[in-house]
């Protein structure tokens, strides 16, 4: 079913709560609806897929069509040995998907608890937290190719997943609308407790059960991250920078307490952008209607009435301050429109 809204306010459709409007919003609840929306001669000239609005910053009126998937079906498709294949429609809230899997004793999603957004956005951003990423559990991604007007499927190996990146942010950007995602989850316990905070929080609850790990992740996130209903934000605004190994070793020699993490490339290391921002003196810093959160330096917050332009200007100041101190340029994780 298709629902269309014109000249629609966006404040409640983006977690920054920026006051902008869109020319048109179209909600759809099945992949067949896209055949109608993109019928020959009817294709929207300027469109963007809007999930939960949790990783987006509107800096101006959106002069075009926002497409919002609202289908929320989750189903078990098949079981292959220990792997249970689950398919979820793009409009499912991500944390509802995690809760669904935990309730059924299926392992793989628990470390990604409480990440805001929808299932359809997870492959685009390759969301991740506490040593886990979406790519670890994604089996296949179903999408609509707007140029070919075809429904297609990509296996996880063909999605070009990388740190907060995928083929949907690169080669298929502006050409693909994800309609559903298949996940491969395990019936065998596979606790992933590589992070110190997570180990401590889980042990405090007893055994490393699925529910205890999920509860631990939720407690950590709720303790560090602001509630978007109280303070507008998009979660982590910046990506953790990845630099050559030799540069990382030089920095660690200079800053002994600087956290450094391995990457898939042995010749590179990942730094903690939050630590860099904190050490640059920006944690808790405020300017006008925008600030750096006082408990998590990766998060920029709307203190009330901020425009998208104000947030961008503030973010640029943070980037410049970090670069001046460390010589490293951090970049936004948030999509800016």
Image: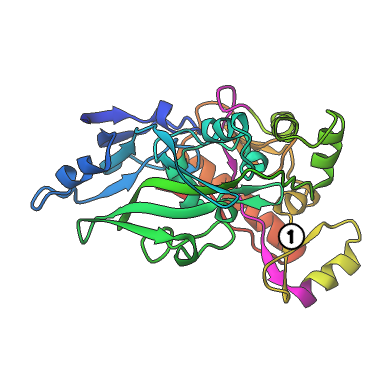
Task: State left or right for residue 330 relative to residue 74.
Answer: right
The image position of residue 273, as x and y in percent, is 70, 53
Question: Label 1's element?
Answer: strand
Asked if the magenta segment contains residue 241, the reply would be yes
* Image quadrant in which you'd find residue 325: bottom right
Q: Residue furthest front?
A: 81
The image position of residue 241, as x and y in percent, is 66, 61
Task: Give 53 or 327, whichever is nearer the viewer.
Answer: 53
Task: State left or right for residue 304 relative to residue 209.
Answer: left
Report the magenta residues as a range: 227-247
Asked if the magenta segment contains residue 88, the reply would be no
Q: Residues within 10 Å of mark 1 (few under 14, many from 20)?
A: many
Report if residue 57 is visible in the image: no
Task: State left or right for residue 172 relative to residue 79.
Answer: left
The image position of residue 333, as x and y in percent, is 55, 52
Q: Residue furthest left?
A: 41
């Amino acid at each position: 079913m298709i629902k269309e809204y014109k000249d629609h306010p966006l404040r409640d459709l983006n977690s920054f709560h920026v006051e902008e409007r869109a020319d048109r919003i179209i909600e759809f609840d099945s992949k067949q609806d896209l055949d109608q929306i993109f019928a020959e001669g009817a294709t929207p000239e300027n469109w963007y897929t809007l999930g939960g609005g949790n990783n987006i910053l509107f800096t101006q009126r959106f002069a075009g069509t926002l497409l919002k998937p609202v289908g929320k079906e989750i189903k078990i498709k098949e079981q292959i040995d220990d792997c249970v294949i689950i398919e979820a429609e793009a409009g499912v809230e991500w944390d509802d998907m995690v809760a669904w899997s935990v309730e059924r004793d299926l392992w793989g999603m628990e470390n990604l608890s409480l990440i805001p957004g929808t299932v359809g956005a997870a492959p685009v951003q390759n969301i991740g937290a506490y040593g886990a990423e979406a790519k670890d559990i994604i089996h296949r991604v179903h999408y609509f190719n707007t140029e070919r007007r075809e429904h297609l499927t990509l296996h996880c190996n063909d999605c070009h997943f990388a740190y907060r990146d995928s083929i949907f942010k690169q080669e298929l950007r502006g050409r693909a609308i994800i309609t559903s995602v298949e996940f491969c989850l395990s019936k065998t316990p596979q606790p992933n407790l590589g992070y110190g905070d997570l180990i401590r929080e889980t042990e405090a609850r007893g055994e490393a059960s699925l529910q205890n790990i999920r509860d631990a992740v939720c407690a950590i996130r709720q303790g560090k991250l602001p509630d978007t209903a109280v303070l507008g934000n998009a979660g982590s605004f910046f990506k953790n920078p990845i630099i050559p190994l030799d540069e990382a070793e030089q920095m660690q020699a200079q800053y002994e307490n600087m956290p450094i993490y391995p990457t898939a490339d042995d010749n590179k290391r990942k730094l903690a952008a939050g630590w860099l921002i904190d050490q640059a003196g920006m944690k808790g810093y405020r300017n006008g209607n925008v600030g750096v959160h006082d408990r998590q330096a990766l998060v920029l917050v709307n203190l009330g009435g901020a425009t998208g332009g104000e947030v961008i200007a503030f973010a640029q100041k943070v980037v410049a301050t970090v670069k001046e101190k460390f010589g490293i340029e951090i970049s936004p994780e948030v999509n800016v429109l």
